[in-house]
Image (cartoon, rainbow, N blue to C red):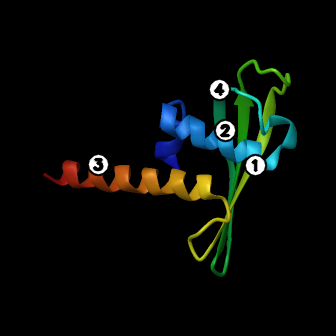
Amino acid sequence: MEYLLENYTQGTYSRLIALMIGEQVEELKQAYFNIKKMKFVSATKKGNELSILMKIWLDKNSRDVKQEGLAIHFNDGISESQSANELFSYLSRYVQAREIFKSK
């Protein structure tokens, strides 16, 4: 999560976060926007289910939405959101590569 909070403005991550927000907020489904700020709110784990809640501030957009909550749910490590799966897959691969590089 730390890596995501440090790098959410990178194109790939920002695009996937915007897609996830569009999946959850109908008025933003077809809107173009950039992520201005992102904050971790909470994470809860019950059995094999994990829920993450983020607060997202948006740059100017055609819908004039300033901030949204983003809920990400995983069951057995997989989300119903393809965008969430893709985002966390990218993050995982990068963090693993970074750890290998650090250990050399």
Label 2 close to label 3 by CB (< 8 Å):
no
Badge 1 amino acid: Glu
Which label number is shown at residue 18? 2
- Which dot, 2 or 3, sits closer to the camera? 2
Where is 15 relative to 42, above or below? above
Judging by the rendered image, the residue that carries numbered circle 1 is: 23
- In the picture, measured across the screen, residue 74 lies left or right of residue 64, that is left
Badge 4 amino acid: Asn
Judging by the rendered image, the residue that carries numbered circle 4 is: 34
The residues tagged by marks 2 and 3 sit, at their Cα atoms, a distance apart of 25 Å
- Which dot, 4 or 3, sits closer to the camera? 4
For this rendering, which residue is in front, 59 or 30?
A: 30
Work out which residue is located at the far bottom of the displayed protein and give it: 47
Q: Earlier in the sequence, mark 4 or mark 3?
A: 4
Where is 56 relative to 44, above or below? above
Q: Residues within 10 Å of mark 3 (few under 14, many from 20)?
A: few
Q: Residues within 10 Å of mark 2 (few under 14, many from 20)?
A: many
Label 2 close to label 1 by CB (< 8 Å):
no
Q: Earlier in the sequence, mark 2 or mark 3?
A: 2
Element under disc 4: loop
